[in-house]
Amino acid sequence: MTEPQVLRHVIESITPASAAHGDGARRSVASANAPLLERLAVQLGGAQHTARPRSARRTIVVCAGDHGAGDPGISLGAAHPTVIAAHAIADGDAALAHVARSSRAPIVLVDAGTRESQAMPSSAVRLGRGLDTGLGHGASRDLMDGPAMTAQDAALALEAGIALAVSLADGGLDVLAIGAIGVGADVASAALLGAALGAPPTGLGDPVAEAAGAKGAAYHRPAFHRAGALALLAAFGGPETGVLAGLLLAAAATHVPVILDGYATGAAALVAAAFAPEVTGYLIAAHAGAFTHARMLAHLGLHPIFDVGLGHGEGTGAAMVLPLIDQVTALASRG
């Protein structure tokens, strides 16, 4: 399948983050003598292409998507782990919801393709209904048995993420924090990491994930670049991987920095960087994470704000960076 026109336009609109503006933002906060804030200032200023970065208009996007590699084989309905996590967020009971309130950040919950979509919160934005995965629901196939998605599904997911970014930016957007929920994302992340490294990731402690990593490593490595990025996403990604990757690409094209959380967002970043390497200049890694996340960040050249793992990647860690960003923008506005 050829690269969709909308996707091609977005990719070709991405320019490198501005080193000059990043340095200008760093100098504007240097009086605080806080290296962490200076590092954040460089990232924010470079991504926003201004020496006076902004943070007032922020949104947290949590993308839900289930992978065939984690499919329990039976319908769990409201008892499905993704559904439970989604309702905790929607009802305001999850840790993310508490952090989001204190950070004055609205949460957009997206059903990108879940196994039990009918049981998801009614407030969730549903982007996976148009996908035909052959399973009778939005979740992907098992990547261990063949491609996780068709190329058309992968393209639709990317375009849905781009459309979501455009919608979010409609009223103005300064910074975006993202998270993800869904079963099987760990296996997909291992496969994508293996493809990125060209070698099986070891020490994962999960035989299925390690087998997936080996399968990813066997994937033709030159395909981990724009010409083969769509096929790569279809082979190993899930519905939320595609939506988040599209969101990252569109954010970079519009100079909006994005804060990553756990390995599912790291996997989306790997895919987005395969389409457009310049996208990494618009990414902020919240924390070192768990499982494959630290190695994905290292491959992308990203250094986490916090060296420890925080939560399960549903967005809490990313949201915790927002108060630090507010400090940077407050100092920069006076600098």
Image (cartoon, rainbow, N blue to C red):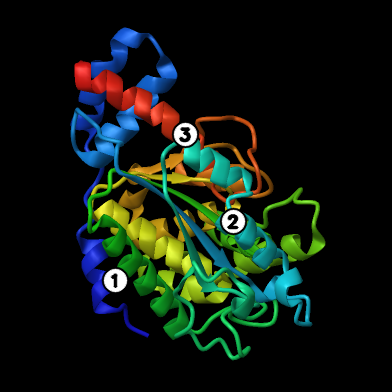
Circle 2 is placed at which residue position? 91
- Circle 2: element type: loop
For the point 78% across and 81% down, the residue is: 73
Of the residues shown, which amino acid type is indicated by label 3?
Answer: Val
Q: Does residue 117 appear to the left or right of 205 in the view shown?
A: left
For the point 69% across and 62% down, the residue is: 84
Instruction: Work out which residue is located at the far front of the displayed protein and give it.
Output: 91
Q: Quadrant of residue 116?
A: bottom right
- The one nearer the camera, 93 or 288, is 93
Q: Does residue 208 appear to the left or right of 132 in the view shown?
A: right
Mark 2–mark 1 contact, CB under 8 Å? no
Q: In the image, is residue 114 above or below residue 109?
A: below
Of the residues shown, which amino acid type is indicated by label 2?
Answer: Asp
Of the residues shown, which amino acid type is indicated by label 1?
Answer: Leu
The CA distance from mark 2 to mark 1 is: 34 Å
Q: Quadrant of residue 8?
A: bottom left
- Circle 1: element type: helix
Residue 94: horizontal and vertical position, in percent? 63, 48
Q: Which mark is residue 135?
A: none
- The one nearer the camera, 73 or 126, is 126
Which numbered disc, 1 or 3, marks the residue that appears first in the sequence?
1
- Residue 298 seen in render: no
Circle 3 is placed at which residue position? 321
- Circle 3: element type: loop
Q: Which mark is residue 7?
A: 1
Q: In the image, is residue 113 above or below residue 245?
A: below
Residue 62: horizontal and vertical position, in percent? 50, 57
Which numbered disc, 2 or 1, marks the residue that appears first in the sequence?
1
Crowding at mark 2 (Cα within 10 Å: few <14, some 14-19, many 20+)? few
